[in-house]
Image (cartoon, grey):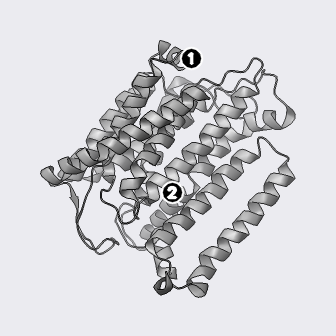
């Protein structure tokens, strides 16, 4: 655990320290988010914060190569492939932040970044369906690319309020880290050092390091450079872990059930808020006869503001919902089902009461 704590600290410190430099670069290159009808900020804000996040992740990787146990992960090219894909997608997002790119170019860039990871070894090897189902490479590689594209765009969709995307991804990564670390400890023999666990530890650090600059009122937006990067790293962790559970390991009954079910359920759970936002947006736009990528002001965070929440309160409530879903899904691996279900239900009722009741009990004008 000490090596993961160091990875977290290095990622957070480097991201935090690099963000002011990246903000200066964004101002010099004209990478500003203009004030549009659907936006909630009142003045143009510099963006491109994802470049600082990439620097934090790269620093964490460099530190890991010097550590006794995590350095063993670099005996293969998987993490190098992740860094390569991250650099490509961050560069794509940075160019979009400065000059603006059409949706087709961005989609092609996302697929290239995913392909770099897949051909570098970061790809689904099997699916935990009815045991372990091994599918042909011709199926698994395209499926890997699809997962990356969905994850990157889900994070991009939810990036609409100061600190929202970084916080949700940080919570999701923390949940995934807890699951992958604790489930690996139950192996016989235990093996807690994996690519997925490292990526999520670094990802939590990156988000924590960026949030002081990005929480409302934000001094810098992550932009597409950050949203696409976070989505890709989250997808990389998911892909690295899914299908890697050894069904012959000596796991307890609860952990064994988790080994088969959570590799499918958890990736969906940790991205529930972004994926729900994507699904609602696409459905809404198709019903209106619009293209699915047409922007509007009806995302989940817009609806929270319309309910009467302040900017910060809306973000904190969406954090709460994300934590309930992501950490709740993980809890099924380690406690009795009825206990986990009861806690999740109680937390969900509490979050619902806050979501709908706070605007009436404590209006924004009193904050």
Horizontal side, residue 204 vs residue 221: left or right: right
Residue 69: mark in rendering: 1
Image quadrant in which you'd find residue 291: bottom left
Image position of 348 with respect to 93: above or below: below
Residue occupying image coordinates x 42% and y 26%: 61
Residue 121 versus residue 199 in the image, above or below:
above
Task: Tell me the SS state at disc 2.
Answer: helix
Mark 1, secondary structure of its residue: loop
* Residue 169 at x, y percent in the picture: 50, 49
Which residue is label 2 attached to?
274
Between 36 and 315, the residue placed more toward the observer is: 315
| Image coords of residue 114 (percent x, y) | 40, 34
Q: Residues within 10 Å of mark 1 (few under 14, many from 20)?
A: few
For image coordinates 50% across by 42% down, the residue present is 204
Please identify the quarter of the rendering in which residue 157 is found. Answer: bottom left
Please state if 316 lies on the left or on the right of 34 as rendered.
right
Is label 1 in contact with label 2 (beta carbons under 8 Å)?
no
Q: Residue furthest top?
A: 75
């Amino acid at each position: 655990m000490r090596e993961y704590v160091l990875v977290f600290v290095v990622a957070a410190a480097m991201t935090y320290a690099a963000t002011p430099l990246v903000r200066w670069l964004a101002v010099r290159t004209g990478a500003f988010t203009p004030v549009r009808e659907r936006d909630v900020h009142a003045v143009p804000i510099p963006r491109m914060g994802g470049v600082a996040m990439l620097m934090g992740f790269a620093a964490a990787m460099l530190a890991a190569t010097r550590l006794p146990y995590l350095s063993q992960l670099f005996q293969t090219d998987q993490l190098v492939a992740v860094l390569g894909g991250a650099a490509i997608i961050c560069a794509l997002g940075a160019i979009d932040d400065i000059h603006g790119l059409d949706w087709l170019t961005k989609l092609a860039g996302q697929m290239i970044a995913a392909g770099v990871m897949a051909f570098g070894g970061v790809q689904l090897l099997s699916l935990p369906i009815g045991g372990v189902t091994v599918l042909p490479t011709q199926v698994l590689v395209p499926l890997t690319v699809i997962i990356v594209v969905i994850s990157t765009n889900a994070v991009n969709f939810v990036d609409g309020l100061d600190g929202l995307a970084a916080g949700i991804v940080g919570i999701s990564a923390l949940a995934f880290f807890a699951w992958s670390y604790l489930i690996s400890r139950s192996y016989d023999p235990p093996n807690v050092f994996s690519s997925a666990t490292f990526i999520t530890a670094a990802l939590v650090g990156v988000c924590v390091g960026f949030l002081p600059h990005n929480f409302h009122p934000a001094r810098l937006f992550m932009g597409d450079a950050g949203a696409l990067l976070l989505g890709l790293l989250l997808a990389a962790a998911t892909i690295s872990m899914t299908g890697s559970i050894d069904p012959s390991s000596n796991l307890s009954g609860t952990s064994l059930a988790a080994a088969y079910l959570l590799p499918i359920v958890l990736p969906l759970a940790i991205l529930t808020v972004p994926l729900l936002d994507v699904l609602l947006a696409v459905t809404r736009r198709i019903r209106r006869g619009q293209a699915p990528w047409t922007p509007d002001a009806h995302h989940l965070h817009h609806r929270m503001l319309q309910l009467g929440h302040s900017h910060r309160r809306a973000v904190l409530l969406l954090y709460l919902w994300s934590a309930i879903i992501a950490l709740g899904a993980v809890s099924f691996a380690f406690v009795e089902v009825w206990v986990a279900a009861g806690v999740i239900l109680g937390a969900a009722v509490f979050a619902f009461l806050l979501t709908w009741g706070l605007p009436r009990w404590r209006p924004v004008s009193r904050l």
